[in-house]
Image (cartoon, rainbow, N blue to C red):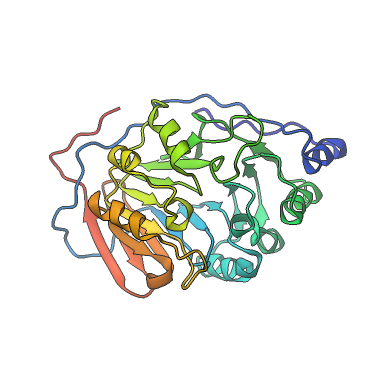
Amino acid sequence: MNRIKSPGPRTGWCISALILLACIVVAGCTFHGISSHAGTRVIPPSYGVNDGRLAVHFIDVGQGDSALILYDNTTVLIDAGEADAGPRVVSYLKRQGVSDIDILIATHPHSDHIGGMQDVFKNFNVHRVIDSGIPYTTPTYRKFLQTIDQKNIPYSTVRRGDSFYPAPGLAILVLSAPDGSKDEDPNDSSIVLRATYGRVNIMFEGDAGVPTEESMIHSGLPLESQVLKVAHHGSPHGTGNAFLDRVRPEVAIISVGAGNMYHFPAAETISRLENAGALIFRTDTGGSTVVRTDGMTFSVETAKNGMYPFALDPTASATA
């Protein structure tokens, strides 16, 4: 199996260059096609909790993002909210029995995605960090890089089309990542991921906007996903119609803070999701939201509103 290559021996000058944003080491990967689902829809479910091996927790961190993937003894954390959400993320992970984090992914360097990582670093043994690696000069991002260096955590960046396998049976495909061009917008340079377990696909869109979505549409990579973590907290500048036509989500999860100053999620984004037939879950109204799957069926459970089971149409066949 091809995996993200581990970084070679690290030296002080290398991470210093990272901190100075003058040098980023990119780990190469080889992409293998991952099957996408086809023709799926919600059918009348048998009402019971899905006890599948894969659980994805969309943690309520207020106005920010944090998602936890649990699969057997493997733990992947994607983002960690603002700095003031760090203790909340730590508490949530500990309640799930997490002690080590196999892969910590920073989709992009904005504080509402990486601010809480200092608390994560303090409380858990992090085995690897994957970062967008775009030049960014804020104190929050500098501290993030400094901590990685001080703890000697293996660090790598990714390219579109890379794939990695945190554990047998679980594949994660990089649908979008920075391309190295100058003046890249941090949001549109978000790492976008698609996790696949059996016939169930879950997409994490970071803060990507319509230009990034358009590039994904033309990339030739599989986009269809039953579950979509909506881009940029429901901003009107992402989750476009053309993209939704390709993704065909059955469930849309919006990580957003109650009464936020941006008035997210935008009414037009909600309308596009509804028109696409997606059932919408929001952390500001439902709290932390958990998707559990056995690879054929999945359920969505919210902290405040309970559980919603789903199943794939048994007449649909998977396509590569």
In-front residue for pair 159/215: 215
Q: How many marks?
A: 0
Residue positioned 60% across, 47% down in the render: 108
Residue 251, located in which quarter of the rendered image?
A: bottom left
Can you name the residue that lies furthest to the bottom here? 304
Q: Position of residue 264 (x, y in %)?
A: 44, 62
**Residue 273, above or below 46:** above
Q: Position of residue 155 (x, y in %)?
A: 69, 40
In-front residue for pair 5/236: 236
Residue 124, located in which quarter of the rendered image?
A: bottom right
Side of 272 where 261 appears, left or right:
right
Residue positioned 32% across, 41% down in the render: 247
Residue positioned 69% across, 58% down in the render: 121
Side of 271 where 286 appears, left or right:
right
Q: Position of residue 198 (x, y in %)?
A: 32, 41
Locate the C terminus and report the quarter of the image it occupies.
Answer: top left
**Residue 149, above or below 263:** above
In-front residue for pair 165/172: 172
In-front residue for pair 271/77: 271
